[in-house]
Amino acid sequence: MKRLLAFLGALLISASVFAAGSDAVPDPNDTDERYVYNNTVLEISGVGAPYESDNSVVFTAKADSRFTGIAFSFEGYKTIHPFRIRKTRDADGKVTDSLMFYILDRPKHIQSVSYRLIVDGLWTTDPLNPDKYYDENTGILLSRFTFSTTTPPETAVTKENAVRFIYKGTTGQNIYLAGTFTNWDPWIYEMRETAPGFYELNLPLPAGTYYYTYYSGMKALTDRTNPHKAYTADGRVASVITVK
């Protein structure tokens, strides 16, 4: 317990270092990401319990402290993320209210997050979140947020050195997979709809880097669940995955 408190104290001393650039701020070059983030901020209507929004969690706090930060168990409490201030104004531009917020992008394959707040140098649970529990391993009281939905499936390499390809679209489509492993033949592998709008295909592949895309008829569709994309030698945009 003493060692844990000393560790948390060291984190507090380093808060100013962690604060720089640690907030959940969108990539300024990503228009879609910036749009979602800004809309999420504008939709914050007041201070209350954390809630889900666009595959993120919104934490809020009263704007009556000099500093409010948050640390998560899945990061080992190694980073203190600072809250930001949101001000509302009337038609004349006069500030009518203010609050503090932090937006967490949902971590992959995590159904719930445990966390603590740090308010003006003091560690505390979230007073706005009724879900609290005592962690016997650390000997401290933690706040917890549980997602109401499961993590959406995404294209990934499985433990069997196969690739589970996922296409996200509308229900009732005929989706095919093509890539460097099929010499771009779009009719070899047809994907199966495993949930409304989600199509799946498990394909064993040897170690290497592969370029691929999906097809609906002759229309090429990039993988919306995989952010890694590149141009192929013939100039097409393709998704990229590496099997090690």
Image (cartoon, helix red, strand yellow):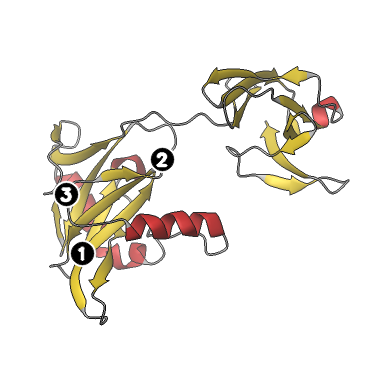
205 is higher (above) or lower (below) than 23: above
- For the residue marked with disc 2, what is the amino acid? Pro
Label 2, residues with CA under 10 Å away: few <14, some 14-19, many ≥20: few
Residue 243: image quadrant is top right
Label 1, residues with CA under 10 Å away: few <14, some 14-19, many ≥20: some
Mark 3 and mark 1 lie on one chain; the one further toward the N terminus is 3
Residue 200 location in percent, x, y? 61, 21
**Looking at this view, is 232 or 80 the one in front?**
232
Residue 107 location in percent, x, y? 41, 40
Mark 3 and mark 2 lie on one chain; the one further toward the N terminus is 3
168 is higher (above) or lower (below) than 16: above
Label 3, residues with CA under 10 Å away: few <14, some 14-19, many ≥20: some
**Looking at this view, is 132 or 6 the one in front?**
132
User: Can residue 160 be seen at all in this image of the molecule?
Assistant: no
Q: Which residue is mark 3?
A: 5
User: At 14% across and 34% down in the image, what residue appears?
Assistant: 133
Q: Look at discs 3 and 2 and give the one toward the viewer.
A: 2
Q: Is residue 131 left or right of residue 72?
A: left
Disc 3 is placed on an element classified as: helix
Residue 38: image quadrant is bottom left
Q: Is residue 216 left or right of residue 41?
A: right
User: At 40% across and 42% down in the image, what residue appears?
Assistant: 55
- For the residue marked with disc 1, what is the amino acid? Leu
Q: Which residue is mark 1?
A: 99
User: At 59% across and 32% down in the image, what residue appears?
Assistant: 169
Number of numbered discs visible in the structure rendering = 3
Disc 1 is placed on an element classified as: strand
Cα–Cα span, label 2 and label 1: 25 Å
Mark 2 and mark 1 lie on one chain; the one further toward the N terminus is 1
Cα–Cα span, label 3 and label 2: 26 Å
Q: Which residue is mark 2?
A: 107
